[in-house]
Image (cartoon, rainbow, N blue to C red):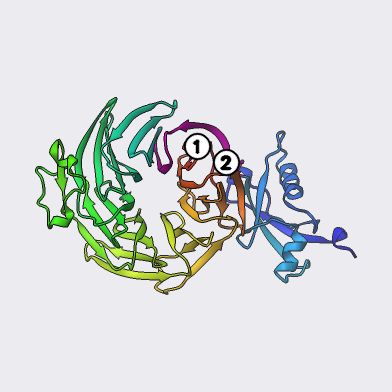
Amino acid sequence: MSTEQEQVQVRFVTKQQRYAVRDAAILVPADFKRYGLSEIINNLLGLDKPIPFEFLIDGEILRSSIADYLTTQQLSTENLITIEYMESMLPPTPLTSFQHDDWISSVKGYDSFFLTGSYDNMVRLWNSSGECTNTLIGHTEAVKSVAFGPSSDSSMMIFSAGLDHTALAWQVDGSDEELLYECQGHQGAIESLAVNASKTQLATASADATIKVWKTNVPEQDEPIVNDSAAPRKKKRTEKKDHLTKTQAVTLMGHVGAVNAVDFDTADTNTVYSGGWDHSIRSWDVEQQVNVTTKNCEKVVLDVNYSSDARLIATGHTDNLIRLWDPRSEDGVNVKLALRGHQGWVSSVTWAPHSPYSLCSGSYDGSIRIWDIRSKGSIYTLEQTEKKILAVDWCGDRILSGGEDKKLGLFQAKAF
């Protein structure tokens, strides 16, 4: 009997109760793929308007026929196969793009606002209508990272950091903006910053091989500079100083070489994750100022993002891979999964909010990819530009991107 004529006994289950069908075993053609299986579920549900579904066997998304999958897994078509199904994620839809004067190094979304950091030394705040409501001028060199801080009904706090070795804290109230304070202390460029879930701490990762963790509150007065090397690089910044200086921070040392990325554990504000040129991903206890675990891999770590839903760390690397790590494991080399598909360095990774499976990445190959970690490949590829993508962020149902094409790209996206 040929594969096309074979049938396999399956049982359909779903976690989406509105699409639940009887879980009694039925026979389906073994050569059925996703579309044939979707037709079966739609017929069982009696839907007037067909809904596309995705299918999982043993936690892995089905990308071939049932027969091909069973052959790959060395399973018999005589087995009863349990297939989980769920509503399919629609392809991300391009919405619009906002032009900049120079490369965009960092993007962040919050509610209906978007934040960009640029190589023109400026930070820009955008609203959902595409208007640049505020341009924050204070850095003397390229801005490498931006983040949102505490906010109220009328105002919000914004953080930025860059090649001038400093992190700046801003207050934005409508069309008005004020530079509140400057974090001094790093001896090299700040490559990345992150704010904890409670917005009470700011972490900065630097080319000086250190991570510093600062309190986000505004100091009552200038904090004393610990040593001369912590002084501002640009004298002109001190000639007309209209903001406070913050120098008191926890310093985390252990990396050998530049630290490229930092992120807080969203469930534990005392835990910070970092990655750098020494090919390591490290977790830190901020209060104790100790390196708790170190995970090593073959290539430089360019970005780090933690998901409390997946309880995994995603990292982007110079060997074009995305690696997923379990921070709870104490094993030094314990890559849970490696995602392959990019043809250039993976510069930025971001988990989808409120999803343990969906992930977005940006690469020097000019593409943005959407991943479901239950599948071995990316589920969607956005061929946005031939220029390098330097930053992506997944905020609500929006994906933001920025890079060498000098445009803030916005996409509509829905996570699994």
Is 223 situated above or below 273?
above
Q: At label 1, which amino acid type do we have?
A: Gly
Does 265 appear above or below 102?
Answer: below
* Label of residue 56 in the image: none
Residue 37, x across and y down, in percent: 74, 50
Q: Residues within 10 Å of mark 2 (few under 14, many from 20)?
A: some
Left or right: 396 with respect to 241?
A: right
**Region in magenta:** 89-110
Seen from the viewer's position, the closer of residues 372 and 84 is 372
Question: Residue 44, percent across and down?
Answer: 73, 44
User: On the image, which quarter does residue 136 sit in?
Assistant: top left
Q: Is residue 312 visible to us here?
A: no
Q: Is residue 98 magenta?
A: yes
* Snapshot quadrant of residue 142: top left
Residue 409, numbered circle: 1
The quadrant in which residue 288 appears is bottom left
Q: Given contact means CB atoms under 8 Å apart, are the residues at marks 2 and 1 in contact?
A: yes
Distance from Cα at disc 2 to Cα at disc 1: 9 Å
Quick one: SS at disc 2?
loop
| Residue at image point 24% right, 41% down | 169
- Say above or below: 72 vs 200: below
Q: Is residue 121 left or right of residue 363?
A: left
Magenta-span inclusion, residue 139: no
Query: Residue at 19% of width from left, 55% of height from top?
Result: 249
**Residue 34 position in % (x across, y down):** 72, 50
Q: Nearer the viewer, residue 51 or 393?
A: 393
Q: Secondary structure at mark 1?
A: strand
Most frequent secondary structure within the magenta stretch: strand
The residue at which mark 2 appears reads as 384
